[in-house]
Image (tube, helix red, strand yellow):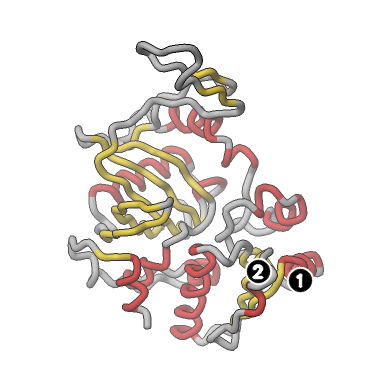
Amino acid sequence: MNFVVFESGSRAGLSAELFFEEYVKATGAKHQLFLSDLDEDFQHIVSRHTQVHLIHDVQAFEMLESGEAVIFPADELTRQSNPVAYKIAQGQSFSNVLPFYYNKMQMNEYLAPLTSDCAIRVPETFALSNVCVKPNSMSAGSRNIQFLDNACVMQKIDIKHEYVVDVLRYDDEKMYIFPREVTLKNGYDRFIKLLPLDGELAIHVSEFVKAVCPKKDGMFSDIFHLQLCQDKSGQYYYIEFSKRISGTSCVNIVSGMSPFALIDGVDQQINTRFIDGHWRRFEDFMLMMK
């Protein structure tokens, strides 16, 4: 099978490449991975693996439209915003997306009643999208006033801990949950602590997922990730979800995460060695994979 990854100049593209290399090394699979990006310089990078190829988006779309490849879910926007990619992605459950997945207000309003009994709460979301935000204190003129169109307005959470949880769901019941606590810089994981695959947060995520999708179908199927947080009282909150691997998901390779194994219907080989309560830099995980 040939896989195309869009927006491959990102960390998610790097994660897809590392997952692929690890899977080929472990299984001898003959798949080919095509990493695509709009940046003209990207295709001039030389891959270190004979089954990994760096191409431009034009070539990627030619492959997809001719039926030579499928989309591996690592991109942030392409499957949503490009009509050709959107249509092709619908042909595979692991790459399929729907428009409402990325409407944050609509998604919160959809999730809240389904998960009302779960340990993970959906923040209160207000039924307004075009808003004028004013400080509720002394102000002069129009200082500190924001006018926002098409915004999701929800309660502010006093965040103490932030989490990213990658999930590989094989069927209605069987799923592998890879949670990690993170500190962020510019939206990327800076420091990372791997959490138990069967610990408190993983149990709460399983409950949340099954409350929304009792069957392996739709938004919480195959490959996806959740962003969560915990406030100072210990309450967990949902932040958002994406139907793709998370950008820094490659850190879970040391625990046995393998999205290509899921696609091929092969079981995961779990390793708990590095789930030890220690914080590590993202770069430390890269050094482990050398």
The residue indicated by pointer 2 is: 36
Q: Is residue 121 left or right of residue 71?
A: left
Q: Amino acid at mark 1?
A: Gln
Q: Residues within 10 Å of mark 2 (few under 14, many from 20)?
A: many
Q: Could you tell me residue 157's position as x and y percent?
A: 32, 31
Q: Amino acid at mark 2?
A: Ser
In terms of image quadrants, where is residue 9?
bottom right
Q: Residues within 10 Å of mark 1 (few under 14, many from 20)?
A: few
216 or 58: nearer the eye?
A: 58
Mark 1: which secondary structure? helix
Q: Which mark is residue 207?
A: none
Residue 1 showing in the rendered view: no
In terms of image quadrants, where is residue 61?
bottom right
Q: Residues under labels 2 and 1: Cα distance?
A: 8 Å
CB within 8 Å, label 2 to label 1 = yes
Q: Residue at x 48, y 71 (%)?
A: 261
Q: Residue at x 53, y 86 (%)?
A: 48
183 or 271: nearer the eye?
A: 183
In terms of image quadrants, where is residue 278?
bottom left
Q: Quadrant of the N terminus?
A: bottom right
Q: Which mark is residue 59?
A: 1
Q: Residue at x 42, y 62 (%)?
A: 248
Q: Sequence-wise, which precedes: disc 2 or disc 1?
A: 2
275 or 281: nearer the eye?
A: 281
136 or 67: nearer the eye?
A: 136
Pick out the residue farthest to the front: 140
Q: Could you tell me residue 280's position as x and y percent?
A: 25, 65
Q: Residue at x 55, y 19 (%)?
A: 131
Q: Could you tell me residue 167's position as x and y percent?
A: 42, 56
Mark 2: which secondary structure? strand
